[in-house]
Image: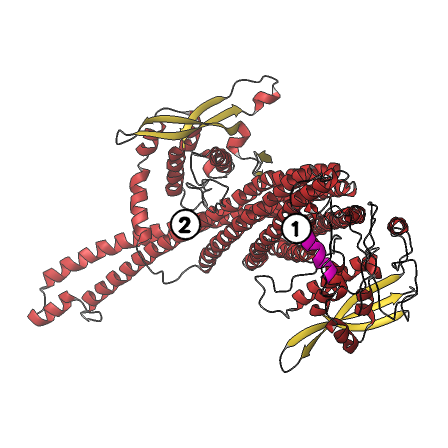
Amino acid sequence: MSASVVDNTVSSGNSSVAIPTDISGQILDLDEDDELEVFSKDTSTTQTDGSSFNASMQTSPASMINQYKFEEEEEDADTKDIFVTVDNPESHVTAIETYITYRVETKTTRSEFDSSEFEVRRRYQDFLWLKGRLEEAHPTLIVHPLPEKFVMKGMVERFNEDFIETRRRALHKFLNKIAEHPIFSSSEDFKIFLTAGSGELTSHKKQGPGFLSRMGETVKAVAAAVRGVRNRPQEFTDMQEYAEAFSQKISSLDKVTQRIVREQKEYLEELKECGPTYALWSQSEQELAEPLKNVAGCVDNCCKETEEQVKHLNDHLIPVLHEYVLCADTLKMRDELDKAEDRLEWANNALKTDWTRWQKVMRTDLRSAFIDTAERNVSYYEKCLAVWESFLQSQRTDAEGNGNVDSS
Amino acid sequence: GQFLGGLGFVMVEKGTSLLKMMEISVAEAEKRTGKNAVNMQETYTVYLIETRPVDAASEGTNPVPDSLWRRYSEFELLRNYLLVTYPFSVVPPLPEKRAEFVWHKLSADNMDPDFVERRRVGLENFLLRVASHPDLSSDKIFYSFLTEENGWKETVFETGFQAKADSRLKALNATFRVKNPDKRFAEMKHYGDELQSVISQLLRVRARAADRLYGVYKVHGNYGRVFSEWSAIEKEMGDGLQSAGHHMDAYAASVDDILEEEEHYADQLKEYLFYADALRAVCRKHELTQYELEMAAQDLTSKKQQREELATGTIRTFSLKGMTSKLFGQETPEQREAKLKMLETQIEEGEELVKERNAECEEFVKSAWVDIERFKEQKDHDLREALISYAIMQISMCKKGIQVWNNAKECFSKM
């Protein structure tokens, strides 16, 4: 049986309830006024050594928090010790189904890994499983979204090249977000995901939801049981209000960007007819033939640039915005926990820290996505500018060659 | 040369009599209401034509220009007069009667101020083209169009051009086949057809592309709105987002100027679309002239043949008279004499007519070909300039884009 480690919490209350290792069949018996201390227990005999990234029950919650903060600061330094890539999609055909697997390559110096390099193949289902596990284990933390399970409307084929590439990029981002997360990256499930052979993974999966998901479910049940407005910390309310507003804004941005892509594509369709029309005209002319052909070429070049610019929007900005739309949905769904705030104050700090971290990551991601888009647009206009300037240049040399003065 | 308000450079020949003497412009447009021919109230636009002696500026004085108001229908009348009176000239076209090749934002309404403004420019261009034309510029009717507000219409009608116009029109509309078409004119007509077709296509395609481009830019305005709203809920990102939003608004707004400039380019193309028509008209008139010559020649040949038959008594050509005389007996020598005499007269007249028509044809070909060559040079020059100005417009658009997105990028960096 495996479980994710690290969801230790701070108990601000005096009494703490120790959770027995096996609560199957038992319901947590909680007094409403008791503070609940919840922590996970790793009962696996293959428990790896207690590295700094691996929390155990023995570590006091207080020190855990310190550790958490420490890790957060470290994130920015060059201490990245795990590198995950998702690439090389391959199609598999069986009697019952066809599916795609992706190569997941891990390079790490972390001691809890048996080796420094791993290579496995995973399919979308496996990613979904991993996400589910992390969410169950850490219901209060923000798990980065996965690309959607089903094809987006408008796509004909699940195995369309662009779709696979978009999905691959999203899966790559997903794993990297996990790897960068101070808590998730130490998850046992994560480790198994990265390292286990397919047989091992399947049997690991089969081991059922386990203690921790029960814990997660119970937490939710408790949360649901606690109704009524108590002294909800203002920060938490702010957070949820923000989540709602953010969700709206990011959805709008996503829609606006998709609309821009649509309009650009329609513009491109019309522009594609201009070049050939100039070329056609040049066939009826003598003196004008050369400049007309030239203009036709320029328009065609601009078409190519426009096409690439649209592709860039589609491949870069839109996936990022989309990710954060899904993120925002995740944020909003945590509202349930909100009501249990007074009951589950243990969640408060871990949640707040995770929240701060998430905001920082969001800011970085979106900022770089927008900067990237702006740069690409500048580049687009620069290329088109060069195209037309070369036309002007050719006309000037022509004019000078013919002894005329260009009076433009 | 002269720079014509917004429409670019028009090649003006040195030594052109009229433009050497006077400056011409269509300075303003105004709405008027009045009663029309069927006594119904109507609203129409009038255009102010200003003329001023050329040396006025150089003398240092700045006299008030002479001016008069004309409406579009009077311009049309002038042009029709010129078409009939100078059939061998490629007569400059008027700006379009109704707005065509519009894209959605442009109004197709004749009273729309933007349309009126573009028409004003087009009318000025028309006058300057006529005034710089070697043949048309010295026309008296043209001169009085520019200088005599009252009674001009009557003067035009007094020339009797209307009757000529009607008969010409009838002849041109009838189908006729020329036996020996002049190859050059046939090619020119074909070129006119092609030019008309391809420019129409280009204008259509361009209008659709303009429509789409408008959409792309305007949607970016939504970024402005959302960034602004979003900035309100953010702390660190707020300022960067807000200012980026302003740049997105500026980007969205910039398309209006861009497309207005492109409309000028479209107007330049339209002028040559209509010029193609004028060119074809000249070729058509040549065909008519040629046809009339051929008809006269044909008629003469047949009369000569009749004379020969009558003189020699042999019937080579079928004629009803010949048949009846065969059936009902020969004519008397006196009758034959009379007939021969009539034929002689007709043949003399016929020869005169052929000579006349031949001279007409030659004259027409000579004059028309001179003007066609002039037109070709003008067209090549103007259209090349138009393409260059189009490139300059595109460059300007790109520069604006670079500026906006660089500014936006800076703002994003502050997020």
Q: Quadrant of the C terminus of chain A?
A: top right
Residue marked by disc 1: A225
Chain letter for mark 1: A
Is label 2 in a helix, a strand or a loop?
Answer: helix
Q: Is residue A209 left or right of residue A150?
A: right
Q: Horizontal and vertical percent for residue A207?
A: 75, 72
Q: Is residue A407 above or below residue B52?
A: below
The reply to whether the magenta stretch includes residue A157 is no
Q: Residue furthest left?
A: B328
Work out how far the residue at label 1 is from the one at label 2, CA to CA, in angstroms.
90 Å
Residue at figure coordinates x 63%, y 77% from the top left = A97
**The magenta stretch spans which residues?**
A214-226
The residue that appears at 59% across and 16% down in the rendered structure is B61
Is residue B330 in view? yes
**Quadrant the N terminus of chain A occupies:** bottom right
What's the residue at 45%, 40% (across, down)?
B94
The answer to which of A122 and B388 lies nearer the viewer is A122
**Circle 2 sits on which residue?**
B281
